[in-house]
Amino acid sequence: MKNLKKARRVQVFAILAVVLVLAVGMIGYGFKDGINLFRSPTQVVEEPPRQGEIFKMGGLVEEGSIVRGEGTVVTFKVTDVTNTIPVRYEGVLPDLFSENQGMIGTGSLQDGVFVATEILAKHDETYMPKEVVDALKEQGVYQEPET
């Protein structure tokens, strides 16, 4: 009788371990494309993402680079002062999107052009996304906003 209880207990633990491993595996597989890492233009140049990888890229919109095409297509360049990446976006840009201002875009790199599916811009004249500030500080070119 004792051996039967012990064997049953081992079976239950083995089944629980298999279920746990499967659950963790399914969660990991589900998050595979759901995690978007932030990169600066320099990081994109130094370590190009794999083909079709979705990621976030941010920096400053380069002065004089915004070109509005047909319809809602907009092209511009994002820089962290060291490197510059061309961006193509189709959609309505945020109202506060402008040159020399911080932005973060979500998209993928296609033939050297960051094709954005979403663009986020500052929400007031002094705000800059934390990731952009950190990337600019890393490059040694960040300047505190004047108050």
Image (cartoon, helix red, strand yellow):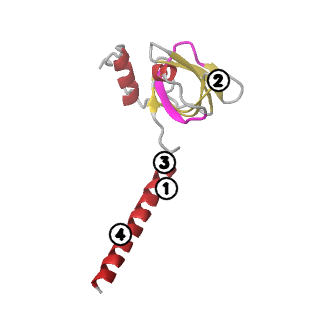
Describe the element under mark 3 as helix, strand or loop: helix
* Residue 104 in view in this figure: no
Q: Pick the residue in front: 147 or 102.
A: 102
Q: Pick the residue in front: 114 or 88.
A: 114
Describe the element under mark 1 as helix, strand or loop: helix
Q: Of circles 1 and 4, which is in front?
A: 4
Q: Of circles 3 and 4, which is in front?
A: 4
> Where does label 3 land, which residue?
31
Binning the other alpha carbons within 10 Å of mark 4 as few (below 14), some (14 to 19) or many (20 upward) gives: few
Q: CA distance from mark 1 to mark 2?
A: 32 Å
Q: CA distance from mark 4 to mark 2?
A: 51 Å
Q: CA distance from mark 2 to mark 3?
A: 26 Å
Which picture quadrant has residue 116? top right
Q: Which residues are magenta?
A: 52-66
Earlier in the chain: of badge 2 and badge 3, it is 3
Asked if the residue under mark 2 is in contact with the one under mark 4, i.e. CB atoms within 8 Å, the reply is no
Q: Pick the residue in front: 54 or 4.
A: 4
Queried whether the magenta region covers residue 54, the answer comes back as yes
Asked if the residue under mark 3 is in contact with the one under mark 2, i.e. CB atoms within 8 Å, the reply is no
> Where does label 2 land, which residue?
111
Q: Amino acid at mark 4?
A: Phe
Asked if the residue under mark 4 is in contact with the one under mark 3, i.e. CB atoms within 8 Å, the reply is no
- Residue 82 placed where, x, y %? 45, 13
Earlier in the chain: of badge 1 and badge 2, it is 1
Q: CA distance from mark 3 to mark 4?
A: 27 Å
Earlier in the chain: of badge 3 and badge 4, it is 4
Earlier in the chain: of badge 1 and badge 3, it is 1
Residue at 37% x, 16% y: name it.
139
Binning the other alpha carbons within 10 Å of mark 1 as few (below 14), some (14 to 19) or many (20 upward) gives: few
- Residue 61 placed where, x, y %? 50, 19
> Where does label 1 land, which residue?
26
